[in-house]
Image (spheres, grey):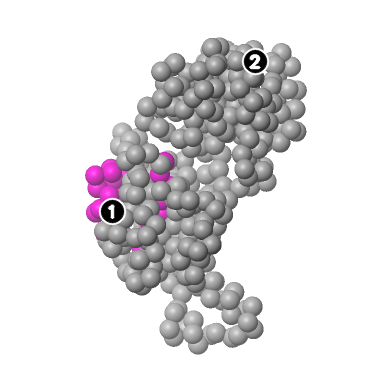
């Protein structure tokens, strides 16, 4: 069996380390692993590949891969894969959903606490050696997350980990998801379908975006829906920047309707230095790193290894992707 490994990406962290490739070779000495580090090497290697462990592939690569039967995405998102071509060939696709979920959930809660407890003001005052006790107890006092309502758009692996932690803080959690046939987790107060989104947003204190980016979620949250949130609400996006109308978000922040935002993703990355988002003191801008943790690749390779064993045995694979739905 031949496996192509192709994880070339502008951000070094998302390139599989050579040490992890060696782990695979040690675990599967009977499998030939080709580690491509350029598009040209990937195009050459995929011609004889039965399996691809990849962060991205082109339609042309799939066209030149007559033996390809299974692609495993090193990320949870699969939108960068040529899903139409893979579906036409009935090539199996799996992803790494769940691997980044705990770290991303910690990021969400951490960002929420920074803004809710006014740590951004405390740290700014610390750098200036100012004692702001009166300011924090008179004008811009912190608010407790306990008893507040959090609406999570996208109650998948990431959304559920966020919900679990929010529930532990005493928050009321509403989850939006498409698959209403799945059981309601005990740490979620209410499950609603996409058609109930507006009702779930009204009076919401914290909005968390954790949904996949597909055509239906493009600019899902615009000015009208931001206005439905409770005045002073906090918006947190760890999914994709395209899901929120960025200009509408800027206007809601500038007008004072929102109490702040925690943004790890943007419509265009890196975020333009001229973007007004940089200027808001109550906006936390993170460079798309919410899922980063030191043992990330250990878990990705362990997941792929388990799936490779299953693939060899002909057993069902973990984390199958509905290529027609896009997630």
In whole angstroms, how far apart are the C-alphas of marks 2 and 1? Answer: 48 Å
Q: In the displayed structure, would residue 48 be above or below residue 114?
A: above
- In the image, farthest residue toward the bottom: 134
Mark whose residue sits in front, 2 or 1: 2
In the rendered view of the protein, which quadrant contains the C terminus?
Answer: top left
Q: How many marks?
A: 2
In-front residue for pair 113/34: 34
Task: From the top left corner, tell me how far across and down residue 189 is, in percent.
Answer: 34, 51
Residue 318, visible in the rendered structure = no
The answer to if 146 sits in the magenta stretch is no
Q: What residue do we see at 63% from left, 35% from top?
A: 8
**Residue 203 falls inside the magenta stretch:** yes
Q: Residue at x 52, y 22 (%)?
A: 60
- Which residue is labeled 1 in the image? 200
Task: Identify residue for label 2.
Answer: 2
Whole-percent x and y of residue 224?
26, 58
In this view, 136 is above or below 180: below
Dot 2 or dot 1, earlier in sequence: 2
Residues packed near mark 1 inside 10 Å, few (<14), some (14 to 19) or many (20 plus): many
| Magenta-tinted stretch | 190-212
Q: Is residue 319 above or below residue 70?
A: below
**In front: 137, or 28?**
28
Q: Residues within 10 Å of mark 2 (few under 14, many from 20)?
A: some
């Amino acid at each position: 069996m031949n496996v192509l490994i192709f994880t070339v990406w502008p951000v070094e962290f998302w390139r599989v380390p050579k040490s992890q490739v060696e782990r695979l070779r040690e675990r599967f000495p009977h499998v030939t692993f080709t580690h491509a580090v350029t598009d040209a090497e990937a195009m050459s290697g995929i011609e004889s590949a039965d399996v691809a462990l990849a962060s991205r592939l082109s339609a042309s690569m799939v066209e030149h891969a007559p033996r390809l039967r299974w692609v495993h995405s090193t990320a949870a998102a699969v939108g960068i894969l040529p899903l139409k071509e893979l579906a036409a060939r009935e090539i199996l696709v799996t992803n790494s959903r769940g691997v980044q979920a705990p770290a991303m959930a910690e990021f969400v809660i951490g960002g929420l606490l920074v803004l809710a407890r006014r740590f951004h003001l405390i740290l700014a005052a610390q750098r200036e050696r100012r004692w702001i006790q009166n300011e924090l107890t008179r004008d811009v006092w912190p608010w407790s997350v306990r008893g507040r309502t959090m609406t999570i758009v996208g109650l998948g692996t990431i959304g559920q980990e966020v919900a679990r932690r929010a529930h532990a803080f005493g928050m009321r959690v509403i989850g939006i998801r498409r698959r209403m046939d799945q059981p309601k987790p005990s740490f979620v107060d209410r499950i609603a379908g996409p058609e109930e989104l507006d009702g779930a947003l009204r009076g919401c204190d914290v909005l968390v975006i954790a949904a996949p980016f597909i055509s239906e979620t493009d600019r899902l949250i615009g000015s009208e829906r931001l206005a439905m949130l409770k005045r002073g609400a906090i918006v947190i996006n760890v999914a994709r920047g395209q899901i929120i109308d960025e200009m509408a978000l800027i206007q809601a922040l500038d007008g004072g309707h929102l109490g702040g935002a925690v943004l790890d993703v943007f419509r265009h990355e890196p975020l333009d230095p001229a973007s007004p988002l940089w200027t808001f003191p109550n906006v936390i801008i993170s460079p798309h790193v919410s899922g980063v943790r030191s043992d990330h690749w250990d878990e990705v390779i362990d997941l792929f290894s388990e799936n490779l064993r299953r693939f060899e045995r002909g057993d069902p694979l973990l984390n199958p992707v509905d290529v027609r739905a896009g997630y």
